[in-house]
Image: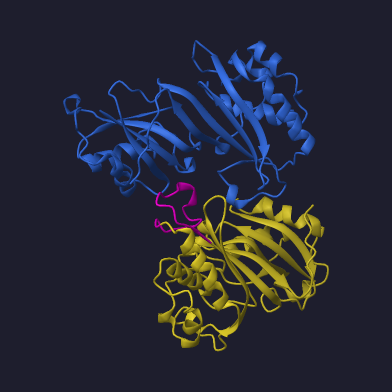
Chain colours: A yellow, B blue
């Protein structure tokens, strides 16, 4: 068996999700906690790589013993108690919200059916100390009509497309086709603009480039009807800027099978 | 003239509001920023002292030149531009939200008519990395009926009383009578419990002891009808624990005169 855990973290405290020697990372913290709990080394396999400063409301990671012989019934902790066991060892900036037992064949990245990200923008002209490292504070207010233009531009992204224009240059992925299931822009009661996007997968920096492009639509630098042309061009330089990492939250990961998270 | 500024800060970054040599404080940052903007030393007088870790959504401070000769028309920056001038010099964890010109005789502490504080409690059994240093995470859920008991207990606090039972021991204030105008407990849509209290003034740690006492009512350790008895006892040991600083926010300061805040 494998353990699957659901993790929430404040990305401002970490140099991304993947292990980097000498730097605090989410994977590094989970690996150290697992060793303390189980008394042996475990492999931690995440559902995706998040960059330094990027947050997760719900990140999934598989935990399995590094020693292949230890695969059956290796977990001495009742599954429902696993989250608290992790939380007692992890720093306060990461929390395990639930755990579940999955098959040995389950892969937290390859078995993903869809992922959802939220990108937060504060357009207030007054900066907010409580949004430092938690939202993109642009300092440049958007009117209702600007938000409406961003909302209309969303439809151009929906569907299965080659999203090469929305991939960081230098990335070496061969298949750049992805399907975006939904994309919405909405200003909440707190004044914060929330961009929510769900897809079967994302290219490197794709959400941040979509956020930057939508903001350019809001500011009138990109036409609301130009999204299809930008996608068709397959040219990164036609899309908007890459929005900074601090506004980005991995908010949900869905799998083909139902995961019954437990927390006792 | 004096300048009055409205300040918001994330208290987790500071060792309180008052200057302490060698430690980052709100007053220290404002003093350094004022010196950079105006080119001479200024006195910064705050509306109250907040402890290390305590936040402010709206803190007021007066700025005046230390050199008494420089009192008239000493501010070379148009009043509406003062907030941005400060914000360009201050760390991101403090922001000036507005400025106003006041008389030389105005005192940001003695002229206070009422102050409002908010105390945030998260009672979820799963800790939230995004609430670290921003709420009291008790880890012990409260039911609706517990919250209702806390709400009923609030009425015992309202009015003019000697609040010695709700003052940190060791404090040397002689007049411990204060008038509480309103006190409410409310669970928001985000699940966070908000205690909001408004009074003509507060004793040292008074809001944190009220929050700790209300939580004890919620957990059944203190009866909801016992508040008046605790107040009458004038005995600190009868009240509940002092809630930790991270949940406390100074949320509003009202003066006898109307302050017309400007931000350009």
Q: Where's residue B191, x and y in %?
A: 68, 45
Residue located farthest toward the left when viewing the structure as drawn = B69
Q: Where's residue A68, x and y in %?
A: 74, 76
Quadrant where the N terminus of chain B sits is top left
* Residue occupying image coordinates x 43% and y 46%: B93
- Left or right: where does residue B175 sit relative to residue B79? right
In the displayed structure, A158 sits above or below A101; it is below
* Residue occupying image coordinates x 42% and y 22%: B256
Residue range of the region highlighted in magenta in the rendering: A120-140
- Left or right: where does residue A215 sit relative to residue A65? left
Q: How many marks?
A: 0
Residue A124 falls within the magenta-colored stretch: yes
Q: Nearer the viewer, residue A230 or A169?
A: A230
Splitting the image into 4 quarters, where does residue B188 fall?
A: top right
Name the main secondary structure of what is drawn in magenta: loop
Residue A91 falls within the magenta-colored stretch: no
* Residue occupying image coordinates x 53% and y 65%: A16
In the displayed structure, A195 sits above or below B34; it is below
Q: Where's residue B203, x and y in %?
A: 53, 20
Residue located farthest toward the bottom when viewing the structure as drawn = A174
- Left or right: where does residue A129 sit relative to residue B237? left
Q: Where's residue B6, x and y in %?
A: 39, 37
Q: Nearer the viewer, residue A72 or B106?
A: B106
Question: Is any atom of residue B19 visible in this view?
Answer: no
* Residue occupying image coordinates x 46% and y 78%: A168
Question: Is any atom of residue B35 visible in this view?
Answer: yes
- Left or right: where does residue A102 sit relative to residue A49? right
In the displayed structure, A198 sits above or below B197; it is below
């Amino acid at each position: 068996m494998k353990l699957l855990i659901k993790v929430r973290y404040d990305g401002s405290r970490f140099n991304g999700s993947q292990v980097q020697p000498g730097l605090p990372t989410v994977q590094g913290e989970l690996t150290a906690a697992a060793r303390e709990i189980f008394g042996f080394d475990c492999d931690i396999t995440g559902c995706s790589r998040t960059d330094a400063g990027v947050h997760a409301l719900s990140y999934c990671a598989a935990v399995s013993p590094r020693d292949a012989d230890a695969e059956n019934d290796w977990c001495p902790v009742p599954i429902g108690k696993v989250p608290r066991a992790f939380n007692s060892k992890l720093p306060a900036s990461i929390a395990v919200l639930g755990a579940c037992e999955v098959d040995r064949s389950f892969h937290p990245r390859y078995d993903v059916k869809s992922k959802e990200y939220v990108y937060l923008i504060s357009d207030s002209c007054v900066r907010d100390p409580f949004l430092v490292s938690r939202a993109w504070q642009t300092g440049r207010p958007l009117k209702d009509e600007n938000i409406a233009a961003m909302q209309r531009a969303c439809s151009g992204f929906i569907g299965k497309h080659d999203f090469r224009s929305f991939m960081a240059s230098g990335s070496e992925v061969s298949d750049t086709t992805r399907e975006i299931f939904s994309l919405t822009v909405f200003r909440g009661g707190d004044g914060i603009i929330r961009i929510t996007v769900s897809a079967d997968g994302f290219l490197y920096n794709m959400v941040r480039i979509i956020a930057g492009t939508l903001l350019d639509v809001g500011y009138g630098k990109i036409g609301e009807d130009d999204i299809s042309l930008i996608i068709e061009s397959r040219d990164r330089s036609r899309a908007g800027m890459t929005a900074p990492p601090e506004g980005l939250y991995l908010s949900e990961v869905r799998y083909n099978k139902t995961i019954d998270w437990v927390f006792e």
